Image: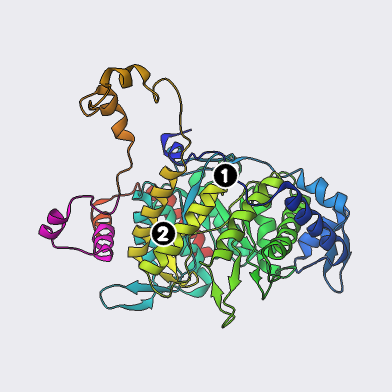
Amino acid sequence: MSAFSDRFLIREPSTMISEEGKKKIHDSALELMETVGIRIHSKTARAALKKAGASVDESSMVVKFPKNVVEDLRKKIPRSMVLSGRTKEYDLPVDGSHHYYTTDGCGIFVWDEKKQSRRQSLLEDITKTAIIGDHLPYLSIYEPMVVAHDIPEKIHVLKGMKEAFENTSKHIETESTTTPEEARAQIKMASEIMGGVEELRKRHLISAMVCTMSPFILEGPSTEAAMIWAENHVPVHITGMAEMGISGPATIAGDLTVNHAETLALACAMQAHEPGSPLLYGSVLSSMDPRTGGYTGGSPESMILGAASAEMARFCNIPNSCGGIGSSARIPGLHASIENSHMAAVAAMTGSEVMNGLGVVDGSTLLSYEQLMLDHEIAGITLKTYKKIEVNNDTVPLDLIKKVGIGGTYLNQMHTLKHIREFHIPFLWSTEGYDSWVSKGKKDLMEEAKQKSDWILKNHEPKKLDGDISKSLDKIIKEF
């Protein structure tokens, strides 16, 4: 694979749950799937599961899953895949050894740092963030980050994807799809770029987020969309969002159990409909604020839930897309960065393969160009921190250490010149001394972030789509 994907390699994950604990959660989820069942509002999914051996009550739409059916379907899930870029340079192997970062999606407001207020999000915000995302070295996957209020509701998903396709060569994840018709149209668009549906099945230019509805519901149109994604081998991030104390039990293990059952239910539906279709166990779980019942995406419980979900995915031998940088801070800045730093560290430590959420705060509703820069810096630091430590004759230069001896210096050694290039250099801020910082205007971090994003927009030119392909995408949108 490319040097781009190599920068996201991390060391072996740590564990938070014992093997006995993971088995308890898994077995409990299987029991719930068999006795309580999952209400599935998709006729296509119910039919496929019935054929696979599940018990289906059409009047209530509740599907009950015998344990052997779940385990048989689970074995059909591919353990690895490649999330492809428009060019192979940006291909991302999902094989258990990498830790990738995405932007977040579905924001409805944009933060104006100068005015200290928010405005409605527009299509140009997708264009701009796609250009920035194309440039950022530690951003792996671009997700259209906002809902474009200046675009008719019926086509805003497709227009957002068109801007993403035009302005980044990286892999694109679509989050806002709510109908099978939207899924089909996006598959047409991606197929135009890749050279046909069969090529898209081989090279996964796009992947899709599909959310379950806790507790124990698979909503109709989005699940029908999941069946369309499955037919075309578009990888699906199955994203449970059970909230402790509201839509899930008020314990970490209990919330994980509910989420595990929901995730396996949609995974089984996909495999029953299209065996071997790629998917990721993609949980973004949270806890409620015990004082208000509000969402707290950056709580310690939420961080643990995301990391532990990755463990449950590995227990089932399923690729994962768990946890996320997604602070519940109301505005960008210090609060969001503190929470996001902890979330990134815990997710990397426990081996989350795809980490969702750069650049959006306040429950994933508020895009901040400045926070995107800060979160990207957090990603870079996290990746460096969790790199595997290489121990060999070059990294332990015994002869050199003897040569320098007592009281010497390594500054003038070729070994230093070689390896200093591997040191982490901040992308955003300067490491110069205080006097230099003062002489350059004493800029605070938010100002630095704003200037950095402005610089990227002014200087970075993404590789555009071929003109004929671009026109074909416009035609697909018009026909839709």
| Picture coordinates of residue 92, whole percent (x, y) | 51, 41
Q: Residues within 10 Å of mark 1 (few under 14, many from 20)?
A: many
Judge whether residue 459 can be spotted in this image. yes
Q: Which mark is residue 90?
A: none
Q: Amino acid at mark 1?
A: Leu
Going from the N terminus, do you reach mark 2 or mark 1 first? Answer: 2
Q: CA distance from mark 2 to mark 1?
A: 19 Å
Q: Residues within 10 Å of mark 2 (few under 14, many from 20)?
A: many
- In the displayed structure, 445 sits above or below 193; it is below
Q: Secondary structure at mark 1?
A: helix
In this picture, residue 54 sits left or right of residue 293: right
In which quadrant is the C terminus drawn? bottom right
Q: Which residues are magenta?
A: 427-453
> Which residue is at 10% across, 58% downward?
439
Q: Report the residue marked by disc 2.
A: 163
In this picture, residue 110 sits left or right of residue 76: left
Q: On the image, which quarter does residue 215 sit in?
A: bottom right
Q: Report the residue marked by disc 1.
A: 200
Query: Between residues 66 and 339, which one lies in front from this camera angle?
Result: 339
